[in-house]
Amino acid sequence: MSDRFARDLLAWYDEHGRHDLPWHHNRTPYRVWVSEIMLQQTQVTTVIPYFRAFMQRFPDVQALTEAPEDDVLSHWSGLGYYARARNLQKAARTVVNDFGGEFPADQEKLESLTGIGRSTAAAVLAQAFGKRAAILDGNVKRVLARYHAVPGWPGQTRVLNTLWEHAEQHTPDTRVRDYTQAIMDLGAMVCSRSRPACESCPLQSGCLAYRNSEVSLYPGSKPKKAKPEKTTWMVILEDSDGRIMLERRPPSGIWGGLWSLPELDPAFSPDELPEACEQAFGFDCSDAELIGGFRHTFSHYHLHIQPARLSVTASSNIADNDSQRWLHRDQALTLGLPAPIRTLLTNPEQTALL
DNA sequence: AATACGTGGTC
DNA sequence: TGACCAAGTAT
């Protein structure tokens, strides 16, 4: 049953673990699910305020299904990986339509919900239903890679499979909920990526990497690749009322479904911007003013964002539609906006310094 | 299997 | 200061 790994880990957790995170209270499947989705590739401290606001606005799965997608995205604004928000609502509708509004306590059925993979399904099973299920997130990967001295980068299927095997083996039959939280806490608080606190680790005596003084070698690092550089114009079209134009981005791709400033081909020179805007958007534009570009780094490429402000002179027939809205800046900030656009609209002077 | 998908923290 | 990475999943 539970080997010394789980036993020692749980003893440590009782004294040192995190027992008071927002999703630890009223631990319903819905709350656990939302927290797990938010926590994908995202730090706990970042998630906490988003989780509170989200629960206030969408208290249950029913409320989530009934909300406009824009509302969900605006609550996700700044969190990143926005497909998570769109998938969240899709999955909520599946729960209501196919599962009678109740989350299934079944690994396979949970994984059928979009946005829920193997690890998230296991986390919901363990945290919300107390069922035995092995998780394997970044924390667990690090702990297990060190404990068993598993060589290689966890992005490789072979390495990943090995880690999953260890994860399954160590998961106990009892106290699965606590165990799941415990191994994540250990990874976050003791077995951290840099400067792990091995002297305070309850698993030290069995840790192969520690025994060999090779803790820093695990887990193996990702092969590095140069990020491509891309450039774009982001135009702030402003009418005589001080309203600016926002465009809804396509549902897939970067910032999918969010509202943002309209983009223009970087091949245009500053001189050509007014005419390019007129052709693209159909308004008389003038006075292109360059605000000062900045570079934004994504996971897989760098984007040079070149903001430019233009005046719309003939604005009599301006109207909102599905993919285009004219709003004052404070109104624009209530939309689901990407973080750098939010910054750009809030404080263009600061952005110009970047 | 490899890649796309965000943002903020860390050193 | 730029590279690296975090409670991963979808395609």
Image (cartoon, coloured by chain):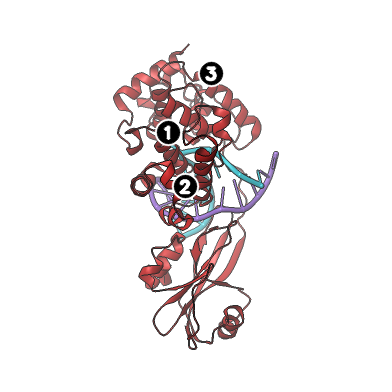
Chain colours: A red, B purple, C cyan
Q: Which residue is mark 3?
A: A169
Identify the residue under disc 2: A65
- Quarter that holds the C terminus of chain A: bottom left
Q: Which x, y percent locates residue C3?
A: 54, 51
Residue at the image position 44 percent from the left and 82 percent from the top: A239
Chain where mark 3 sits: A
Q: Amino acid at mark 2?
A: Thr
- Examine the rendering and report whether any part of residue A218 can be seen: no
What is the three-letter code of the residue carrying label 3?
Answer: Gln
Task: Say which of marks 1 and 3 sits in front.
Answer: 1
- Give a yes or no on whether discs 1 and 3 share a subunit: yes
- First-in-chain label (1 vs 3): 1
Per the image, label 3 sits on a secondary structure element best described as helix
Q: Residues within 10 Å of mark 3 (few under 14, many from 20)?
A: some
Instruction: Name above or below for residue A159 compared with residue A266.
Output: above
- Tell me which chain the residue with mark 1 is part of: A
Which image quadrant for residue A302?
Answer: bottom right
